[in-house]
Image: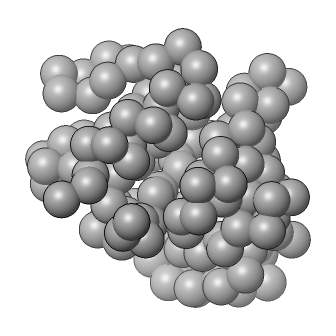
């Protein structure tokens, strides 16, 4: 099986339900032996990283600013000092992406991913864009990303 890099995108602040969903996404990515990539901040990014770490997963954070602004759950911290422009790096570094909730930054990542032909699975999406797939459970979203990106 090919080792995948799965991007998890979403807002830096979120409610408990969204946090719980993102945490489960992180767990599943790690359980299936894949690498989790995200933006390294709080909210969905922290939750997914924490979930992956709870299952022994590898987490790569592509940060908008400095390394010391990262949450505590990233193994590799890439400081870009590019602000929102780092969203392009997250997309290009990911084989597929899972959005959990989110706002304008998440929407931009979804759009870039779709433009680049990447699979995008969404849970509680802020908008629905043609080409993305909306799922009810983390299991469905993770399985879709893995199956759609296996080549």
Give the residue drawn at x 24%, y 23%.
129
Query: For residue 107, which quarter of the picture?
Result: top left
Q: Position of residue 124 (x, y in %)?
A: 55, 18
In the foreground, 36 or 143: 143
In the foreground, 97 or 66: 97
Image position of 38 with respect to 122: above or below: below
Q: Quadrant of the N terminus?
A: bottom left
Image position of 118 with respect to 136: above or below: below
Q: Position of residue 92 (x, y in %)?
A: 29, 68
Q: Quadrant of the C terminus?
A: bottom left
Report whether 74 appears left or right of 133.
right
Query: For residue 15, which quarter of the picture?
Result: top right
In the foreground, 84 or 72: 72
Residue 7 seen in the current view: yes
Query: For residue 137, which quarter of the picture?
Result: top right
Give the residue drawn at x 65%, y 46%.
28
Q: Position of residue 2 (x, y in %)?
A: 36, 69
Image position of 68 with respect to 59: above or below: below
Residue 41 seen in the current view: no
The residue lying furthest to the front in this view is 1
Report whether 59 appears left or right of 120.
right
Report whether 138 appears left or right of 52.
left
Q: Position of residue 73 (x, y in %)?
A: 81, 69
| Total marks placed | 0
Give the residue drawn at x 59%, y 55%.
32
Q: How is the image coloured?
A: one colour
């Amino acid at each position: 099986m090919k080792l995948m890099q799965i991007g998890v995108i979403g807002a830096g602040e979120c409610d408990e339900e969204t946090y719980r969903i993102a945490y489960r996404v992180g767990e599943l990515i790690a359980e299936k032996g894949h690498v989790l990539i995200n933006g390294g901040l709080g909210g969905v990014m922290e939750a997914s990283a924490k979930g992956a770490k709870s299952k022994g997963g590898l987490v790569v954070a592509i940060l908008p600013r400095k390394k010391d602004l990262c949450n505590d759950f990233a193994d590799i911290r890439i400081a870009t000092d590019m602000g929102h422009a780092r969203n392009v790096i997250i997309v290009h570094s990911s084989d597929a992406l899972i959005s959990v909730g989110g706002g304008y930054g998440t929407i931009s990542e979804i759009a870039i991913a779709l433009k680049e032909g990447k699979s995008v699975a969404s849970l509680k999406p802020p908008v629905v864009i043609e080409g993305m797939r909306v799922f009810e459970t983390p299991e469905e979203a993770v399985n879709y990303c893995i199956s759609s990106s296996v080549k």
